Amino acid sequence: MLSITDKNLLETISDFSYKPAASAYNIRKNGAGVERRSTEKVQIETKTDKPGIDIRILPGVKGETVFIPVIITETGVNDKVYNDFYIGDGADVTIIAGCGIHNSGCHESRHDGIHRFFIGRDAHVKYVEKHYGEGEGTGARVLNPVTEVHIGENSLCEMETVQIRGVDSTERRTDAFLDAGAKYQVTERLMTHGNQTARSDMKVELNGDGASAQIVSRSVAKDASAQVFNPVAVGNAACHAHIQCDSIIMDAAKIRSIPEIAANHPDANIIHEAAIGRINNEQLLKLMTFGMTEEEAEEVIIDGFLK
């Protein structure tokens, strides 16, 4: 049975209570699977060689949504899981993931999710991953996701990754490999506060003619938190890539952006843009004229920036 804390975490990271009645899903709690449902079109199987699951979406499947949330509610848990996704040719599927940690103790609670995607031809995958931490304890809440994406010819993969709040330390690693005509669209949204740290390393290799990638990272760093962004785009064919990193820095926070773009083909068109700055004073003053306090105006601006 799921407790109130479990249900609240699931709601925050995956809107799990609103899932369609016939959806495939797998819930992992404190390092073990607790609930699962496969369907005729989506099969979820336990790995036999290491912790994790294999998710297989049949070719031609349309309109399916798969939920694979992870929650940790005990202090001192160190959970590492390997999940592989096999998406058949022509499939159209949405995958809702995410991890929520409730740590009320004094020991570190940690989740390392290693996800690999093998996307066939002419498919469409939307992947949503939200991270969230809470709890009254002094133990750290740590999330270190690793993602590897192989996108087949003429397929589209959309990824939305969000760190809501409450994560003390995170290191994200993403590697993507694009075949001819493949499209990769990533939106990363992140907030840090207190003494939290966040690092995001992302490498995209465009290996086929007509491949394209659009990566947008938006972040806010408050208090004494620190962030590092290291996006890399490599064009090995006639392709197009656009990487954009925008950050708001506040208080005594620190942000670094370390872009790298490489072209190994004369028709590779790769662009990178980065901007780090304070909240716009004119926006702040305008909202304050409507009766908001400075803190309320800041929150409105930040919420709009991270949407």
Image (cartoon, grey):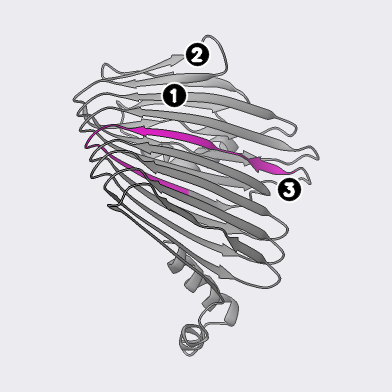
Left of 275 or right of it: where is 32? right
Q: Quadrant of residue 94?
A: top left
Q: Which residues are magenta?
A: 140-161
Do callouts 1 and 3 mark residues in contact (Cβ within 8 Å)? no
Residue farthest toward the bottom in the current orientation of the protein: 289
Give the residue number, with chain letter if any, for mark 2.
47
At x 62%, y 24%, the residue is 31
Crowd rating for badge 1 (residues with CA inside 10 Å; few <14, some 14–19, many 20+): some
Q: Amino acid at mark 2?
A: Lys
Give the residue number, with chain letter if any, for mark 3.
136
Residue 84, numbered label: 1
Crowd rating for badge 3 (residues with CA inside 10 Å; few <14, some 14–19, many 20+): few
Do callouts 2 and 1 mark residues in contact (Cβ within 8 Å)? yes
Viewer-nearest of discs 2 and 3? 2
Locate residue 28, reporting x and y percent: 54, 26
Locate residue 240, reporting x and y percent: 30, 52
Count of numbered badges drawn on the protein? 3
At x 59%, y 38%, the residue is 5
Does the stretch in magenta take in 20?
A: no
Residue 176 against residue 229 in the figure, above or below: above
The quarter of the image holding the C terminus is bottom left
At x 68%, y 49%, the residue is 168
Q: Is residue 12 visible?
A: no
Q: Earlier in the sequence, mark 2 or mark 3?
A: 2
Left of 10 or right of it: where is 255? right
Q: Residues under labels 1 and 3: Cα distance?
A: 34 Å
Q: Amino acid at mark 3?
A: Glu
Q: Amino acid at mark 1?
A: Asp
Q: Earlier in the sequence, mark 1 or mark 3?
A: 1
